[in-house]
Amino acid sequence: MAGRAPARSLRPRRGRGRFAIVAARFNEPIVKKLVDGALEAFAAAGVGQGSVDLQWVPGSFELPLAAQTLVRSRRYAGIACVGCVIKGETPHFDFVAGQAAAGIREVGMSTGVPVTFGVITALTEDQAWARAGGPVGNRGAEAAEAAIEMADVLRQPSGRRRRRRAPASPK
């Protein structure tokens, strides 16, 4: 099922720290839209341009290693990984998409730094464009919002979690 991610209520706030975007050059025109969406989401949440670094890598398979290297620098509160893998005629898609997802998850789990998955995995180029700022949303913006939200959650002292109401169910 495709659709937009649930609406976030990230209020602009200074002092959220530094963030990074790691972007795959493969399918670059689509990924540039994801980067734009991520930058807009960071700005809307009060993370200034000077507090967001952008690192390009060859493809989505390379995203986890670059994210891990950035995490190890201890400079970032969170990292949004963005890329685009479009299914072709061979099983290459399955290997690249699966390993990118597993690697990104592993970096976050092993380091405790939010590393989010903004990689489009689409069957067609039209599906990819729909997820890069089209009618289905922008997966880059969603990855940036998730990185910010998780960094905020992890920054809270244990036992002092904010309580939020569950989102209202759609009618």
Image (spheres, rainbow, N blue to C red):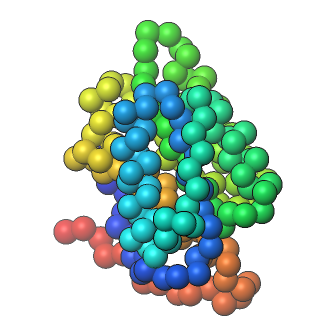
Residue at (74%, 47%) from the top-left corner?
68
**Quarter of the image where the N terminus is located:** top left
- Taking the view exactly as shown, the residue that stands out farthest to the bottom is 160
> Can you say whether 38 is above or below 23 in the image?
below
- Taking the view exactly as shown, the residue that stands out farthest to the left is 171
**Quarter of the image where the C terminus is located:** bottom left
Q: How many marks?
A: 0
> Can you say whether 148 is above or below 102 in the image?
below
Residue at (54%, 66%) from the top-left corner?
50
Q: Position of residue 69 (x, y in %)?
A: 76, 47
Q: Position of residue 147 (x, y in %)?
A: 56, 62
Residue placed most toward the observer, 28 or 122: 28
Q: Position of residue 48 (x, y in %)?
A: 49, 70
Residue placed most toward the observer, 99 or 165: 99
Give the left or right position of residue 89, taking residue 69 as reference: left
Residue at (37%, 35%) from the top-left corner?
30
Residue at (63%, 39%) from the top-left corner?
63
> Can you say whether 111 is above or below 63 in the image?
below
Query: Within the image, what quadrant is residue 44 found in?
Result: bottom left
Give the left or right position of residue 85, taking residue 63 as reference: left
- Taking the view exactly as shown, the residue that stands out farthest to the top is 89
> Can you say whether 18 is above or below 106 in the image?
below
Residue placed most toward the observer, 147 or 161: 147
Q: Position of residue 126 (x, y in %)?
A: 27, 29
From this viewpoint, is residue 22 visible?
yes
From this viewpoint, is residue 166 visible?
no
